Image (cartoon, helix red, strand yellow):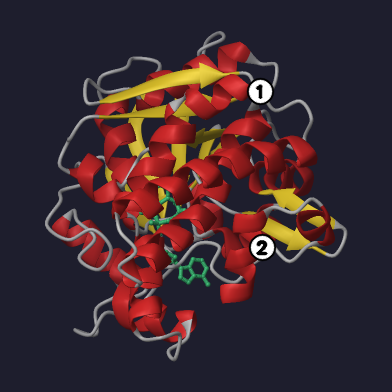
Amino acid sequence: MENGHAKNRVAVIGSGNWGCVASRLIASNTTKLPSFYDEVRMWVFEEVLPTGKKLSESINQANENCKYLPCIKLGANVIADPDLENAVKDANMLVFVTPHQFVEGICKKLVGKLRLGAQAISLIKGMEVKTEGPCMISKLITDILGINCCVLMGANIASEIAVEKFSEATIGYRKDKEVAIRWAKLFTMPYFLVSIVEDIEGVELCGTLKNVVAIAAGLVDGLDMGNNTKAAIMRIGLREMCAFSKLLFPSVRDNTFFESCGVADLITTCLGGRNRRVAEAFARNGGKRSFDELEAEMLHGQKLQGSTECFLSEDVIKNNFGLLKVISVCN
Ligand SMILES: NC(=O)c1ccc[n+]([C@@H]2O[C@H](COP(=O)([O-])OP(=O)(O)OC[C@H]3O[C@@H](n4cnc5c(N)ncnc54)[C@H](O)[C@@H]3O)[C@@H](O)[C@H]2O)c1
């Protein structure tokens, strides 16, 4: 590891659209940075393609994920592995990048299987809603696996980063700045600039809550309400994201909302994300077709984020978070 002698070894848990792009970024850096082994193992949730071939085999043969990121080479040092335990067993740096609803199950399978001293980072935008309240994904990973977990969020529509269009990202960390810097080195490219912020909850909540605002933005588009209304939804949404985050975690900092994970991610998601697109279709269909149905038809295996979740909580209603409340009613 960088703190001394051995090299770092990276495994990526997840191989969807962002999972593949993240693996590609990382794999490009591990070949250049002497403190990392070249090979990046990428755990694949196995699927059988319409051709009858297994997705993991297809990725290893073609060096691309024909289902979730077609026509983009991942790098010869990315190895797809459908065996979760095998994918992570030698790694000391674990990148979690699956849809949020699968994380708990994955972590439970990994208990007792990780290398001593392993570190994690979560690229997952979402939260688990338990009866006792919302639980951030980084905390879920830490609680189940007993390992430190940073987060990386930002204005990062994966298909744009895949073709190396410029963007920025924010790493949120708790106390251990050295570890955050090591993660930043692993992800930074000339077209992908990463900053670090000691506000893990703030960064993660930005990445999570903007998905709700994007649904509102999509509804505005679907109802042809115009750009001024959409801008108002984004402004009010940002204000509510900030207030709601501070209600959950008083330590959250205002400045975090001005990083890529905050206002920039909100803008890109309200302009171009999948939540916006499906919400627009929901409104254009007069609410007659469910989000589940539209998700299956429009996203081909990709997942919506936050369309059916948590915002009917009492805190939200008591504190009159208007936009978040409206969204929950829409669902
Ligand atoms: N795609 C983006 O532009 C983007 C950008 C930033 C962050 N993110 C975040 O990254 C995370 C992962 O999104 P993505 O875009 O890589 O995925 P995706 O929505 O493209 O693909 C879904 C993935 O889930 C897998 N899957 C399906 N059923 C599963 C199961 N039962 N168990 C485990 N895995 C299963 C599929 O194989 C596939 O890899 C999400 O939290 C998302 O918010 C995505």
In the rendered image, is residue 119 in sight? Answer: no
Q: Residue 178 at x, y = what percent?
A: 58, 12
Amino acid type at image mark 2: Lys
Amino acid type at image mark 1: Arg
| Ligand 1 quarter of the rendering | bottom left
Q: Which label sits on residue 253?
A: 1
Q: Which label sits on residue 201?
A: none
In this view, the residue in front, 141 or 309, is 309
Say what secondary structure mark 1 lies in: loop
- When the figure is inspected, residue 185 is found, relative to residue 330, above or below; the finding is above
Q: Residue 218 at x, y = what percent?
A: 38, 64
- The residue that appears at 79% across and 30% down in the rendered structure is 250
In this view, the residue in front, 103 or 258, is 258
Please state if 71 lies on the left or on the right of 142 as rendered: left
- When the figure is inspected, residue 211 is found, relative to residue 258, above or below; the finding is below
Say what secondary structure mark 2 lies in: helix
Tell which residue pokes out farthest to the top in this image: 4
Q: Residue 256 at x, y = what percent?
A: 56, 25
**Local crowd at mark 2 within 10 Å, few (<14), some, or many (≥20)?**
some
- When the figure is inspected, residue 273 is found, relative to residue 277, above or below; the finding is above
* Quadrant location of the C terminus in the rendered image: bottom right
